[in-house]
Image (cartoon, rainbow, N blue to C red):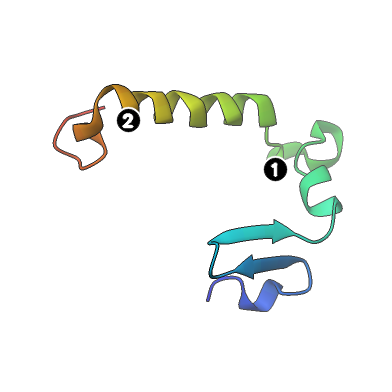
Amino acid sequence: MALIDLSSIVSYNESLGAVQVLHASLVDFPSDKCRSTIFYIDMASTRNGFVRRILQCVERPAAIQGTLPL
Protein backbone atom coordinates (compact mmCIF):
# COMPACT_ATOMS: atom_id res chain seq x y z
CA MET A 1 0.00 0.00 0.00
CA ALA A 2 2.86 2.38 0.79
CA LEU A 3 4.13 2.15 -2.80
CA ILE A 4 0.83 2.70 -4.64
CA ASP A 5 1.47 6.41 -5.23
CA LEU A 6 4.97 5.60 -6.49
CA SER A 7 3.88 3.19 -9.24
CA SER A 8 5.53 5.28 -11.99
CA ILE A 9 8.98 4.85 -10.42
CA VAL A 10 8.69 1.66 -8.32
CA SER A 11 7.09 -1.68 -9.10
CA TYR A 12 6.08 -4.24 -6.47
CA ASN A 13 5.60 -7.92 -7.29
CA GLU A 14 3.37 -9.20 -4.51
CA SER A 15 3.84 -12.89 -5.31
CA LEU A 16 7.64 -12.56 -5.07
CA GLY A 17 7.68 -9.82 -2.44
CA ALA A 18 10.11 -7.94 -4.68
CA VAL A 19 10.44 -4.21 -5.24
CA GLN A 20 11.91 -3.07 -8.54
CA VAL A 21 13.15 0.46 -9.16
CA LEU A 22 11.96 1.58 -12.60
CA HIS A 23 14.14 4.71 -12.94
CA ALA A 24 17.91 4.57 -12.46
CA SER A 25 17.93 8.11 -11.09
CA LEU A 26 16.08 6.90 -8.00
CA VAL A 27 19.18 4.91 -7.06
CA ASP A 28 21.76 7.24 -8.65
CA PHE A 29 20.72 10.35 -6.72
CA PRO A 30 21.17 9.12 -3.12
CA SER A 31 24.42 7.32 -4.01
CA ASP A 32 26.05 10.52 -5.34
CA LYS A 33 27.31 12.50 -2.33
CA CYS A 34 27.71 15.75 -4.30
CA ARG A 35 24.13 15.72 -5.58
CA SER A 36 22.26 14.32 -2.62
CA THR A 37 24.17 16.02 0.24
CA ILE A 38 22.14 15.21 3.39
CA PHE A 39 20.28 12.36 1.62
CA TYR A 40 23.52 10.56 0.69
CA ILE A 41 23.55 6.79 1.23
CA ASP A 42 26.90 5.02 1.29
CA MET A 43 25.88 1.82 -0.52
CA ALA A 44 28.99 -0.18 0.49
CA SER A 45 28.52 0.69 4.15
CA THR A 46 24.79 -0.10 3.94
CA ARG A 47 25.46 -3.49 2.34
CA ASN A 48 28.05 -4.28 5.02
CA GLY A 49 25.51 -3.42 7.71
CA PHE A 50 22.96 -5.77 6.18
CA VAL A 51 25.51 -8.59 5.95
CA ARG A 52 26.59 -8.07 9.58
CA ARG A 53 22.97 -8.23 10.72
CA ILE A 54 22.31 -11.39 8.70
CA LEU A 55 25.41 -13.05 10.13
CA GLN A 56 24.33 -12.13 13.66
CA CYS A 57 20.99 -13.81 13.01
CA VAL A 58 22.66 -16.91 11.59
CA GLU A 59 25.09 -17.15 14.50
CA ARG A 60 22.33 -16.59 17.07
CA PRO A 61 18.97 -17.59 15.58
CA ALA A 62 17.18 -16.73 18.82
CA ALA A 63 18.11 -13.08 18.15
CA ILE A 64 15.70 -13.11 15.21
CA GLN A 65 12.78 -13.79 17.56
CA GLY A 66 13.92 -11.15 20.03
CA THR A 67 14.75 -13.60 22.79
CA LEU A 68 18.41 -12.54 22.84
CA PRO A 69 19.87 -9.03 22.73
CA LEU A 70 21.90 -8.16 19.63
Above or below for 69 versus 25: above
Residue displayed at 71% across by 37% down: 40
Looking at the picture, how far across and down is residue 68, in whole percent? 16, 30
Above or below for 13 versus 34: below
Residue at the far left in the pictured view: 67
Residue at the far front in the pictured view: 15
Residue displayed at 77% across by 66% down: 9
**Label placed on residue 65:** none
Q: Secondary structure at mark 2?
A: helix
Which quarter of the rendered picture does the C terminus lie within?
top left
How far apart are labels 1 and 2 at the CA level? 29 Å
Looking at the picture, how far across and down is residue 46, in whole percent? 59, 31
Q: Disc 2 marks which amino acid?
A: Cys
- Of 69 and 18, nearer the camera is 18
Q: Which residue is mark 2?
A: 57
- Of 27 and 57, nearer the camera is 57
**Label placed on residue 39:** 1
1 or 2: tag closer to the N-terminus = 1
Above or below for 1 versus 57: below
Q: Quadrant of residue 11?
A: bottom right
Marker count (numbered): 2
Relative to residue 67, is residue 59 drawn left or right?
right
Residue displayed at 24% across by 32% down: 61
